[in-house]
């Protein structure tokens, strides 16, 4: 068995069922780096697990991914397509902590993956019930797990006891002895109403407690949120919706008894309620926050079964009676703006993480404005096709849809972009698919330089080295004075020492952006680091951007440093391949700036050969290729001069008589 662990290490179910279960079965337990769905899809083919335990939203996403691939290749075998997504060995899985549609269970069951449904709670050290593999029954939670005794109270509440089922503090405090199960008549109250079907399966009917879980399995106590609105002028009552949903919405009943107050709000009525919700959001955890709200045109009614005789909520009836309105608020999970030839999408999770509501963003004249927090982000297309300036950097996007959710999650996009980091709740979604986004970024033509304030620790980011890398890049890109030199020293140290492949690739991609930097010493420094870099997996340098920039990137100091370094045959050949690619792809004949840049490259080659005589034949061959470059006669003449200079200087240095036709032979 190989189990792909998608639950965090602190999760009770993950510790006691998954971890100890794999030890018992002598299997392999593989931890995922983060809980994103992209990481899951990347790990499937690499780990090729036999089992997966996850929350309903992830199984739904795997199901949708399979359907998407099947639709793209209708002639291929369905089984083959599904296995290309989940791996060749996946044979069982568990979905728990929320509702998952029966069609998803049956889909996987029909294709050799026994997906079972489970029910449990932390107090039960994980699970209480589970459907047997291959015997799933729609909308049920299965039979009691081994070692668990279950029964229903007179009200239908599920009660449990067993060796690994805990007691509440009011029943047994710290240090108290807990009797052996069966020695007393203690039963743990789960707070959920169940029924037992004729086949012995348990089925959840309702929640006795108001507590529910969203589709990620995160527990939410709606009364905790609703109580924060008590006593607020203009609000009679509120009702939180979010059971099994990706985010919460709020139904607000205005206080008609205070109609004068509401009338005085006038056109500011909507804005007033928005400010109230935003203020409450500040005191809530991200998964508890309200993303959208609606003002109801009537109060909840006892006659409609929405209120009990005591005036408390009948939550199930309220959701049923207002289902059309609720569904309309869940029809999409993003806000979209239209720009000049493109669309800008902001997923709701960004609103949730920033404690904002749907209408807090405005997009006007190429600037996205966060009205609530007084922040702005420039998003505008540039004249060159497919290039957009987003915040402080320029990106190549081969699509007309810009998803800021991807920019917030993917470090390859947000790192080094201070405006973006200040505007979005950034994350470590390394596995988020770039798709039509190019991971390389460039500096804008108009570079605003000023003192940089470090990002510091952000609770969304646990990788402190990544944050430091971001700070150093921003300082080098836009900083002034001594702080730039200090950042360069730190960055070069990381460049030479980092063993993290993701940091390594990201750092090299961002160093390429310095080709456009206005400071020559910084351009030369970046080119020196990249040209002396050893070949690395997952990274192919594109140093032609230094040529395209039209700015000098080799001066006397950097040429001397590179020439005196040991490039080694592998790196020198990589340089030659790069130069050969320049001859094929760059527009010829070149302008005066490009010719000057190549003159510096030719000088670098000559100086390197003189320091490392073993490379003279290779350097001479490279210079000869440029001397024969008929597409640019001026550049060819410069290459011939460099070749003759190599011949002359080497003769003087070696103090030996070389044939007079030495340079001719090199052709």
Image (spheres, rainbow, N blue to C red):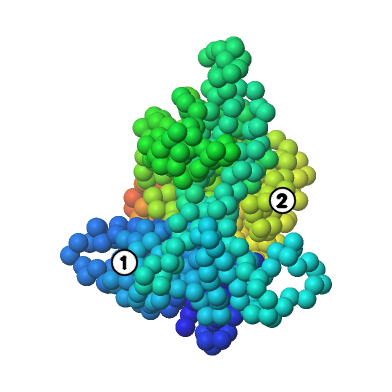
Give the mark, 2 or 1, whose residue is nearer the N terminus.
1
Residue 282 vs 574, above or below: the answer is above
- Would residue 415 be found to the left or right of residue 345 on screen? right
Give me the residue at 58% from left, 38% from top.
310
Q: Are marks 2 and 1 in contact (CB under 8 Å)?
A: no
Give me the residue at 65% from left, 32% from top.
230
Q: Residue 146 or 84: which is nearer the viewer? A: 146
- Residue 228: give x, y in percent of width and height: 66, 36
Give me the residue at 29% from left, 72% from top.
111
Q: How many numbered marks, from 0 up? A: 2
- Residue 370: give x, y in percent of width and height: 57, 31
- Would residue 501 be found to the left or right of residue 138 on screen? right
Local SS, label 2: loop
Dot 1 surroundings within 10 Å: few (below 14), some, or many (20 or more)?
Answer: some
- Residue 374: give x, y in percent of width and height: 63, 28
Q: Residue 159 or 649: which is nearer the viewer? A: 159
| Residue 656 showing in the rendered view | no
Give me the residue at 65% from left, 73% from top.
185
Q: Report the residue that reaches farthest toward the right.
A: 175
Q: Alpha-carbon distance for marks 2 and 1?
A: 45 Å
Residue 170 vs 88, above or below: the answer is above
Report which residue position mark 2 lands on: 457
- Residue 536: give x, y in percent of width and height: 53, 68
Residue 466 vs 666, above or below: the answer is above
Quarter of the picture containing the C terminus is bottom left
Q: Residue 345 or 652: which is nearer the viewer? A: 345
Report which residue position mark 1 lands on: 106
Residue 101 vs 310, above or below: the answer is below
Query: Which quadrant of the figure has residue 134?
Result: bottom left
Q: Report the residue that reaches farthest toward the left.
A: 75
- Mark 2 or 1: in front is 1
Dot 2 surroundings within 10 Å: few (below 14), some, or many (20 or more)?
Answer: few
């Amino acid at each position: 068995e190989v189990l792909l662990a998608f639950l965090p290490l602190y999760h009770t179910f993950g510790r006691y069922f998954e971890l100890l279960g794999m030890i018992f079965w002598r299997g392999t337990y593989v931890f995922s780096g983060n809980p994103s769905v992209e990481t899951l899809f990347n790990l499937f083919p690499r780990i090729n697990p036999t089992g997966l335990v996850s929350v309903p939203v992830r199984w739904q996403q795997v199901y949708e991914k399979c359907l998407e691939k099947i639709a793209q290749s209708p002639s291929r075998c369905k089984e083959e397509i599904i296995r290309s997504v989940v791996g060749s060995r996946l044979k069982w899985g568990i979905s728990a902590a929320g509702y998952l549609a029966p069609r998803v269970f049956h889909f996987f069951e029909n294709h050799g993956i026994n997906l079972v449904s489970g029910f449990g709670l932390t107090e039960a050290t994980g699970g209480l019930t589970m459907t047997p593999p291959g015997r799933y029954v729609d909308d049920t939670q299965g039979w009691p797990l081994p070692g668990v005794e279950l029964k229903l109270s007179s009200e239908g509440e599920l009660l449990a006891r067993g060796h690994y089922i805990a007691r509440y503090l009011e029943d047994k405090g710290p240090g108290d002895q807990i009797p052996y199960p069966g020695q007393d008549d203690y039963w743990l109250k789960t707070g959920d109403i169940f029924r037992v079907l004729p086949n012995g399966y348990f089925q959840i009917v309702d929640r006795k407690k108001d507590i529910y879980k969203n589709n990620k399995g995160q527990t939410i106590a709606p009364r905790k949120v609703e109580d924060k609105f008590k006593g607020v002028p203009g609000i009679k009552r509120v009702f939180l919706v979010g059971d099994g949903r990706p985010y919460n919405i709020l139904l607000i009943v205005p206080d008609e008894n205070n109609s004068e107050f509401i009338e005085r709000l006038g056109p500011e009525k909507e804005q007033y309620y928005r400010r109230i919700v935003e203020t409450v959001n500040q005191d809530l955890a991200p998964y508890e926050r309200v993303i959208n709200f609606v003002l109801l045109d009537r109060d909840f009614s006892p006659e409609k079964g929405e209120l009990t005789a005591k005036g408390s909520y009948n939550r199930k009836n309220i959701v049923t009676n207002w289902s059309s309105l609720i569904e309309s608020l869940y029809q999409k999970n993003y806000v979209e703006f239209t720009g000049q030839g493109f669309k800008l999408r902001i997923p709701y999770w960004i609103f949730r993480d920033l404690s904002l509501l749907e209408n807090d963003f405005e997009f006007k004249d190429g600037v996205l404005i966060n009205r609530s927090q007084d922040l702005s982000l420039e998003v505008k297309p540039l004249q060159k096709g497919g290039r957009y300036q987003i915040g402080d950097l320029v990106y190549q996007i081969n699509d007309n849809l810009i998803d800021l959710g991807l920019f917030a999650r993917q470090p390859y996009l947000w790192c080094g972009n201070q405006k973006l980091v200040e505007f979005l709740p950034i994350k470590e979604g390394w596995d988020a698919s770039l798709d039509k986004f190019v991971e390389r970024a460039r500096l804008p033509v108009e570079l605003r330089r000023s003192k940089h304030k470090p990002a510091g620790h952000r609770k969304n980011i646990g990788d402190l080295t990544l944050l430091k890398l971001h700070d150093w890049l921003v300082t080098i890109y836009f900083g002034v004075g001594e702080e730039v030199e200090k950042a360069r020293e730190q960055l070069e140290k990381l460049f030479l020492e980092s063993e993290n492949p993701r940091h390594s690739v990201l750092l090299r991609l961002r160093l390429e952006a310095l080709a456009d930097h206005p400071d020559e010493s910084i351009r030369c420094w970046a080119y020196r680091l990249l040209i002396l870099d050893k070949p690395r997996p997952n990274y192919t340098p594109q140093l032609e951007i230094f040529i395209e920039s039209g700015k000098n990137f080799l001066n006397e100091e950097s040429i001397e440093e590179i020439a005196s370094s040991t490039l080694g045959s592998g790196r020198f050949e990589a340089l030659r391949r790069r130069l050969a690619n320049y001859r094929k792809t760059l527009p010829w004949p070149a302008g005066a700036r490009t010719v000057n840049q190549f003159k510096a490259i030719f000088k670098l080659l000559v100086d390197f050969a003189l320091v490392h005589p073993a490379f003279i034949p290779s350097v001479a061959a490279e210079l000869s290729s440029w001397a024969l470059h008929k597409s640019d006669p001026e550049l060819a003449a410069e290459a011939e001069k460099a070749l003759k200079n190599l011949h002359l200087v080497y003769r003087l240095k070696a103090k030996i008589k070389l044939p007079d036709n030495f340079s001719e032979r090199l052709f």
